[in-house]
Image: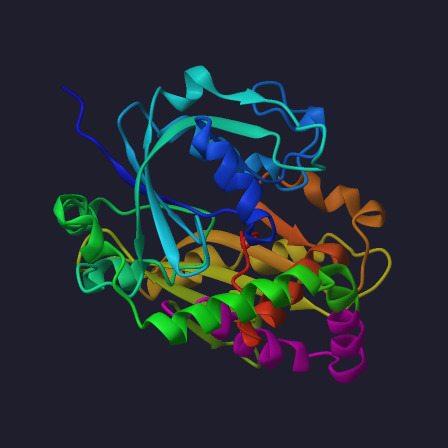
Amino acid sequence: MRERNYWVFRIDTRAIDYLDTELNEGRLRQGWGWDKRQNLTCMTIDEGAGRNRVIMERVKKDDILLIPRLPDWNYVTIAEATADWDQEYRFEIDKDQSDYGHIFPAKRIRSFVRSSSVVDSCIRKTLRVPSRFWNINHCSQAIAKILDAKQEETQIEGFYENRMERTLSRSFLKNFDEKQFGEEVYEQMNNQFEGFEWEYALVYGLERLFPCYEIERVGGRAEKEHGTDILVKLPGILPESRYAIAIQVKDYEGFVRDSVIEQINKADSFWSDEGLTVIDKIVIITKAPKDSNLHLLENTDGIRFFFAADLKNLLLSIGKSFIGIQDSKTK
């Protein structure tokens, strides 16, 4: 018999009430689904939807999901998959919504308050991870403890303090103009930083966004050997293993030459000699548009490119983290 898996599934906090109502009907919806061409079974455009494929492929019947911010800001809902998601997934955009077309079959089991005494540190810690979806099998016993607790024990919290925090957070989100904020952050960052200065700024921002990772600037003279400006280190599965993400930052605009590919490809062998396995290579190009550089996307080395629009989204996520808004679209 297949063992049950445990996952965290983040939602778009701008649509808490709608997504909560949908879950009551057995429909766990996910964003990045505003166009029928983003249907995961026959996708022809991505725009972020492709990252939902791993969700569809991995979740099976009876798996348990923790859903932060549902049904309210300081709560977490525990849900159960009612079917294999790769078999019962469907795509349908509600006529009153402009997104959330991805539908996964699930049912609510119960909800709990984050600050409840029955919530172990294992869960508190993992809920700080800003990813869209991740496995938490290591918290299975902690989840079982919550499921076994009396209902009133899962609801105990600092009553007045949390009510005020919840009210302020939801009121702010309701009136927050995300698009305008993102445009302003991107414009001001380009006014304030140029060349290698971007490396320092991005390290600082990424550290805020991903506090559990070791992030450092490694550019400078040694860059000609490893082609890396920013190195992100992650723990490996085995005690002695470590993974790395190599990031190159180019303050370019317009057309970008293929030489950036040759440069970042140096990362694999160099960091391997340092005991790191490079699992991702990213080139961030601060001002260049994607349409002018489609040739770079044809590389066969697994290199990902963040063009101006992608950097704008990244800076938006960083900016939201600085003002205390959980970004439901962190990738």
Q: Quadrant of the N terminus?
A: top left
The percent position of residue 62, horizontal first and vertical second, equals 26, 26
Q: Main secondary structure of the magenta part?
A: helix
Q: Residue at x 19, y 53 (%)?
A: 238
* Membership of 188 in magenta stretch: yes
| Res. 302 visible in picture | no
Q: Residue at x 51, y 62 (%)?
A: 326
* Membership of 24 in magenta stretch: no
Of residues 84 and 279, the one nearer the viewer is 84
Left/right of residue 207 with respect to residue 42 in the rendered view: left
Q: Residue at x 46, y 27 (%)?
A: 25
Residue 26: which quarter of the image? Answer: top left
Position above or below: 169 against 87: below
Of residues 115 and 199, the one nearer the viewer is 115
Residue 2: which quarter of the image? Answer: top left
Position above or below: 94 against 325: above
The percent position of residue 155, horizontal first and vertical second, equals 27, 57
Q: Which residues are magenta?
A: 184-212
Of residues 112 and 139, the one nearer the viewer is 112
